[in-house]
Image: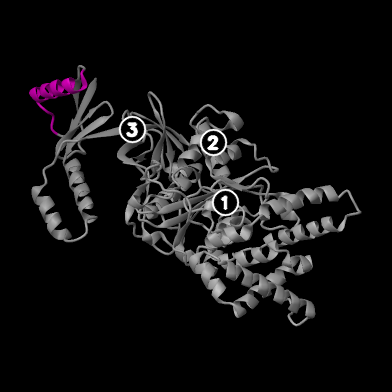
């Protein structure tokens, strides 16, 4: 093994012999050290052996002191005495710094040789200050994805290890802000003070650290909360074709968390910057940005940033979850995330598999979504609920990425294009959608109100298909069709107008008892709106009971039905007008 001493003053033969003997024992092989004059080293020397550099120069010692002082500056309290003590007691140490060399660079990828001990996921630093993350380990070289301008990196540049795994800053200061995948603010509101540094890759909580998912995470959408309830700590997939309302469901869910103590994180992956800006404005207009964090890796960002964006958002969510808070995180969308990862993998010369995705694309998303959990009381009782979004092509849920994520999550909400274009919005397909947590994530009031709505809708859909070929229908079939049409109208909901639990429960009780069957389909929405005002006026205590306790007594249920029938009669008589 060859070694080179660089400095201004050459060492003696005895000093070289001692160094060769010491490092020969350390590396277990014969070491030969030669001298090279380096006028840039004013005092001391550096010793390069293999990929390691032992720095005993004046510059190296000052660098050590600088790092120690920078570490002390993060300590709260009396800084000056600590710095004085550090300077007084500081003794320079000989340390080995492992260096590598850039072989190739391009397309967001740098190939580096010489870093024999670099670890997967470790951050590397290039001379221009650009950072990269180790993504591929081979026998004689490593592949590194870049988080900055690759134009500033050239072949032959020296690369340094940091010994630090990739992470993202986190803290309360990030709430209400828009950041990039590295945690830097991009909303023009100035720097953000970080309270912690969270690794973007972390092990999911174990079974012992979790507790059952039984607390509702209400979306405010009657079509979902009544039939496919989501619980805090659950992973519910939102899946459908392009432009079918997937992001709208996620946005309405965020708006519905106002005043409920839930921190919302929206991770935009490969979205247009204008779309993200529009969504941020919607949140601001509804006062929802004050409890939300937006992580944006737009379509114009390089693939490495799109790749780490969901992990960065998850790491920030874990910071709040570990503090005992409830978090809702939305990944919009994981289809584009998988495409970004496929691009990186192919550039790293990994073997392509099905649909050209690498073999570990399942693990790509499983290790992300498994981190959503509801922690045990011993761990603080915090939770992180994940709503991943996946885009399908022509409704094909059997494609590679959709089937992968369906198998990872606890259910899926399938949005159907035909329903969407027929005006049924949200366009939730009742037959394919499912929540594997089920009624455990519903309050007692919602359980009592939902009844047989899903079965009734399924029967209506079958009857609708069957009767479209028949023109002569009996009265019973006609009534069933009118009832089903009324239920479908009930599930229609305006964008950015989530409903409270009280409103959903009241409307469900009235509809499932066939009271709205006597109202023309076109007037059901207006009828429900005026009915809620009427019940609020006549019996305001019902709203209080449902919203505060999540329960509904038999007496109040009967009161809702009595008031609804009374209001229906008033409408028929013309004493109450529908808007």
Considering the numbered disc 2 on the image, is that residue within a helix, a strand or a loop? Answer: helix
Q: Position of residue 431 (x, y in %)?
A: 68, 47
The reply, left or right, for residue 442 in relation to residue 566 is left
Please, what is the dominant secondary structure of the magenta stretch?
helix
The residue indicated by pointer 2 is 342
Find residue 118 and name its label: 3
User: Which quadrant holds residue 382?
Assistant: bottom left
Label 2 crowd bin: few (<14), some (14–19), many (20+), radius 10 Å: many
Q: Identify the residue at horizontal 56%, vertical 54% (top origin).
A: 229
**Which stretch appears magenta?**
9-28
Q: How is the image coloured?
A: one colour
Label 3 crowd bin: few (<14), some (14–19), many (20+), radius 10 Å: some
Q: Identify the residue at horizontal 57%, vertical 45% (top origin).
A: 411
- Which residue is farthest front? 555
The reply, left or right, for residue 105 in relation to residue 489 is left
The reply, left or right, for residue 324 in relation to residue 4 is right
Measured Cα–Cα span from mark 1 to mark 3:
33 Å
Label 1 crowd bin: few (<14), some (14–19), many (20+), radius 10 Å: some
Q: Identify the residue at horizontal 43%, vertical 53% (top origin).
A: 383
**Between 574 and 360, which is closer to the camera in this rendering?**
574
Considering the numbered disc 3 on the image, is that residue within a helix, a strand or a loop? Answer: loop
Does 28 sit above or below residue 38?
above
Do the CB atoms of the residues marked 3 and 2 lie less than 8 Å apart?
Answer: no
Quarter of the rendering occupied by the C terminus: bottom right
The residue indicated by pointer 1 is 271
Say whether residue 483 is magenta. Answer: no
Q: Position of residue 134 (x, y in %)?
A: 39, 36
The reply to whether residue 63 is visible in this rendering is yes
The reply to whether residue 191 is visible in this rendering is no
Find residue 249 and name its label: none
Measured Cα–Cα span from mark 3 to mark 2:
23 Å
């Amino acid at each position: 093994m060859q070694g080179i001493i660089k400095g201004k003053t050459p060492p003696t033969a005895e000093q070289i012999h001692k160094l060769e003997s010491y490092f020969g024992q350390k590396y277990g092989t014969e070491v030969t050290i030669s001298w090279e004059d380096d006028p840039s080293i004013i005092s001391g020397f550096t010793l390069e052996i293999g990929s390691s550099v032992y720095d005993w120069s004046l510059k190296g010692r000052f660098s050590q002191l600088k790092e120690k002082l920078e570490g002390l500056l993060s300590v709260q309290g009396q800084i000056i005495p600590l710095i004085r003590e550090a300077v007084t007691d500081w003794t320079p140490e000989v340390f080995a710094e492992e260096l590598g060399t850039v072989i190739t660079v391009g397309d967001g990828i740098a190939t580096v040789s010489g870093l024999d001990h670099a670890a997967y996921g470790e951050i590397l630093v290039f001379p221009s200050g650009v950072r990269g993350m180790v993504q591929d380990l081979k026998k004689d070289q490593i592949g590194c994805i870049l988080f900055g301008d690759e134009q500033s990196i050239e072949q032959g540049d020296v690369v340094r290890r940091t010994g630090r795994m990739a992470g993202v800053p986190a803290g309360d200061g990030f709430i209400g802000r828009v950041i990039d995948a590295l945690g830097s603010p991009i909303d023009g509101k100035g720097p953000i003070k970080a309270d912690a540094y969270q690794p973007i890759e972390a092990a999911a909580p174990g079974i012992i650290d979790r507790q059952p998912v039984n607390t509702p995470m209400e979306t405010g959408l009657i079509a979902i909360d009544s039939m496919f309830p989501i619980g805090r700590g659950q992973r519910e997939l939102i899946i459908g074709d392009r432009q079918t309302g997937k992001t709208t469901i996620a946005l309405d869910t965020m708006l519905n968390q106002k005043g409920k103590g839930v921190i919302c994180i929206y991770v935009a992956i490969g979205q247009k910057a204008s779309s993200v800006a529009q969504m941020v404005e919607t949140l601001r207009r509804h006062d929802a940005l004050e409890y939300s964090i937006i992580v944006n890796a737009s379509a114009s960002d390089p693939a490495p940033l799109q790749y780490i964006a969901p992990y960065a958002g998850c790491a920030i969510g874990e910071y709040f979850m570990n503090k005992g808070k409830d978090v809702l995180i939305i990944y919009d969308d994981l289809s584009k995330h998988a495409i970004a990862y496929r691009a990186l993998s192919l550039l790293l010369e990994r073997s392509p598999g099905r649909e050209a995705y690498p073999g570990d694309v399942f693990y790509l998303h499983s290790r992300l979504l498994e981190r959503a959990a509801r922690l045990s009381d011993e761990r603080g009782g915090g939770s992180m609920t994940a709503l991943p979004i996946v885009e399908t092509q022509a409704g094909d849920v059997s494609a590679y990425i959709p089937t992968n994520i369906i198998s990872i999550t606890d259910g899926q909400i399938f949005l159907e294009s035909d329903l969407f274009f027929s005006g049924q919005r949200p366009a939730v397909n009742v037959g394919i959608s499912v929540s594997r947590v089920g009624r455990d994530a519903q309050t007692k009031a919602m359980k009592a109100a939902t009844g047989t709505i899903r079965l009734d809708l399924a029967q209506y859909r079958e009857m609708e298909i069957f009767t479209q070929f028949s023109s002569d229908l009996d009265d019973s079939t006609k009534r069933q069709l009118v009832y089903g049409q009324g239920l479908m109208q009930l599930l229609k909901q305006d964008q950015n107008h989530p409903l409270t639990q009280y409103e959903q429960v009241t409307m469900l009780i009235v509809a499932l008892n066939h009271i709205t069957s006597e109202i023309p389909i076109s007037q059901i929405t207006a009828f429900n709106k005026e009915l809620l005002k009427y019940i609020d006026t006549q019996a305001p205590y019902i709203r209080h009971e449902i919203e505060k306790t999540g329960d509904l007594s038999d007496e109040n249920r009967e009161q809702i039905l009595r008031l609804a029938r009374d209001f229906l009669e008033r409408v028929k008589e013309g004493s109450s007008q529908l808007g």
